[in-house]
Image (spheres, rainbow, N blue to C red):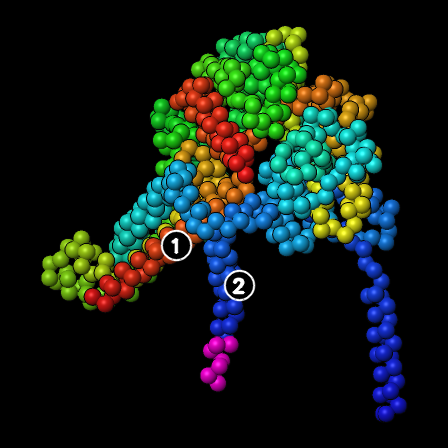
Amino acid sequence: MKKYGWFSLVWVFVFVLFLGVVLAREVKVLEIWDTYTEPNRQPVVEAAIEQFLQKYPDWQVKRTARPLEDMKTAVMAALAAGVGPDVVLVNNGEHMMGPMVRAQQIVNLDPYAEKYGWTEKLFSPSLWNRAKYTLDGKQFGEGSIWAVGLDAELVGVYYNKDLLAELGLSLFGSVAELEEIMDKVKGTGHTPLAVGVLDDWQFFHLYGALQHATLAHEMGADAAQEYLDDLVIRTKAERTWKESGNVEAAKRLQEWVKKGYLVDGFSALGGDDALQVFLAGDVAFFLQGSWYSSNIAQADFEAGFVLFPPFVKGGDIPPQIGGMATPLGISAHSPHPGMAAEYLDFLAASDRTVELQLNLRVLPARVPALLENIPENTLYYDLLVAWNEVNRVNRVGHYLDWTTPTMWDTLGEAGRNLLLLRSTPEELVEKVEADYRAFVAGRSSQ
Amino acid sequence: MILWPYLFLTPTVVSTILFVIYPFLANFFYSTVQWDGFGPKVFVGGGNFVALFRDERFWSALVTNFLYFIFVTALPLFFGLVVASVIARGRLAGTRFFQSAYFIPQVVAAIALGTIFRWIYAPLFGVLHQVFKIIGWEEMSRSWLGTPETATTAVGLIGTWAWLGFCIIIFVAGIQKVDQALYEAAILDGANSLAQFRYITLPDLRFEIAVVLVMTSVQCLGSFAFAIVSSTTAGAYGTRPVALYAYQLAFVEGKVGYASAVVVVLTILMFAIAAASLFLGERRAQE
């Protein structure tokens, strides 16, 4: 009995020793927190992780994906406590990036952007501004790169090819022609434009597209781009919303309402409702983002996509609203930022990512997008052509709610009143300007 | 042996401390700082509360909450009493069916309720629009959720519908425990149905009324209104309650400290309403 006792003790000792050796092996883990839960993004992330693990087989990857607001809360709690992932959600602007830069909780990506050639390979310069802040975190749209998104989005005009052909109408080349076509569509008893402003962002896109085109007409396209960069992204004190182009765009939009171009009940429809209305086939146009393209590609009719037109035929392409996918950065608490950057490169810039994105019908971050294997006369082909064109001319316009933290509320309410014809275009601009001035004053007093 | 009850209470006490009391105290601390959620917290004392009382958006949200109080608390309470009296005392056939039918909205998630009603109210393809069309009242059709005049009412009525069943169940249970001899005596004394309701049913339902007041008003100020509004109008057209405003401040505008001040005020309001309701219930009991 005594002999067996000693024997067992030796075995236990050996087992503990073995366990100690195993546990003592350094386990290298790259932790990722992202929001890419969509079916057309999930495979890209999985492929990036696969590439990373192939190159670094002694590493492990631990990924957590959650919806944006949930993830933002988790990031806030984790980074404040000095813990959290290596690769972290860094939503653009004052939503996250600004406060995170000021709190020195994320890593400056400039060295990695240079190492991997991101600024040459991905997006156009006007879009990179969205990922920039000065080192002190006080100025958005300038300075260093802090985050990178894996794909892109673009707002433009979807159109029902079958309906336009049936009515004998061709595609527009200017805002005036667009209005002419909408007039004719209305005259035949069909609906010219599907929009649902119960979701404020639908108004932001509608007004924004018209505003960008009007400003480009009045100032010149490049000057309009500069103005919009200063206004929406950089929030420069010397800029003002009280430009005639902003008022003119609001006026024109009210005209569209008065002429009945917008779908009946637009004020009580959300974005997804408006999509369904468009998919029903009785509507000529749907001014929305590329994120709806997979739904629209399934429509019973043939659909196309074009950029919002210049004000006059033959004019320069005005800035077009667009952006990068909610981007990711690297936590300042990460013990291995270089590995995190390598993962980001696999995710946004690798050949495998581009190949998958083209199969999944999303807009790749790597520009120009290759069209060779994409069938012409398809919605996706149209989208890629439009995306390449916007990047070629370097005119990515902006989501207007980014202007100030309170602009969503201000412009949302002002927009609803405008479209219900309960306020004037001048009043809209006054309200937005007041919000802008309050933000600029608050920032300069800090 | 005397320790056993405390042992059983421990999980609840610990979870209450962890998930209710600590977050409340932490939130109170956050309400005294200026904080964007990432950077350093700057102590501002009562500054956030002072700003709050000058904040038009806060007052607008509070007024909206008051309107929801009418729809989510007052109307279900009133109609709940009426329907429960009919069901419990009317000896109707199929009482259980009516109770179940009225209670169904309670088992549906608020977000789902919001989505269902968004489709019901939708212009062009909404159920309500189609019904008006069928009966020839097409001119009555509106953008219910898309105009300031109707949006708050349209959202509020979802609350009425959702909480009516809860009120009925509670009141029916309350009425059924009333001593039937009281009603029989009242009938012998010549009391009509209204008098029986006024002098027997209503006083005997004081606890149930207090429970309904607490439950519905807390829901009206808290998560229910939040979920219904975010899934119907997202706060457009004056439908945003205080809870949704606090969310906007914290997670969209990056004003975590200020949002915490809003939540502190909201919590105090909830406590005040709950305490007042329970106090009234207790006082009536003592009378």
Residue projecting furthest to the bottom: A2
Residue projecting furthest to the front: A445
SS class of the residue under badge 2?
helix
Which percent across, then down, holds residue B249?
Answer: 50, 42
Q: Residue at x 69, y 25 (%)?
A: A126
Relative placement, left or right, of A221 versus A21 is left
Who is closer to the viewer here, A169 or B5?
Answer: B5
Q: How crowded is mark 2: few (under 14 residues within 10 Å), some or many (20 or more)?
A: few
Q: Give the residue at mark 1.
A: B268
Type of the residue with mark 2: Leu
Q: Which residue is drawn at 11% across and 62% down?
A: B189
SS class of the residue under badge 1?
helix
Q: Which residue is drawn at 70% across and 38% down?
A: A146
- In the image, residue A383 sits, relative to residue B43, either above or below, namely above
Q: Does the magenta stretch include residue A148?
A: no
Q: How far apart are marks 1 and 2 (CA)?
A: 19 Å
Q: What is the chain identity of the residue bearing mark 1?
A: B
Looking at the rendering, the stretch of residues picked out in magenta corresponds to B1-7
Q: Give the residue at mark 2.
A: B18
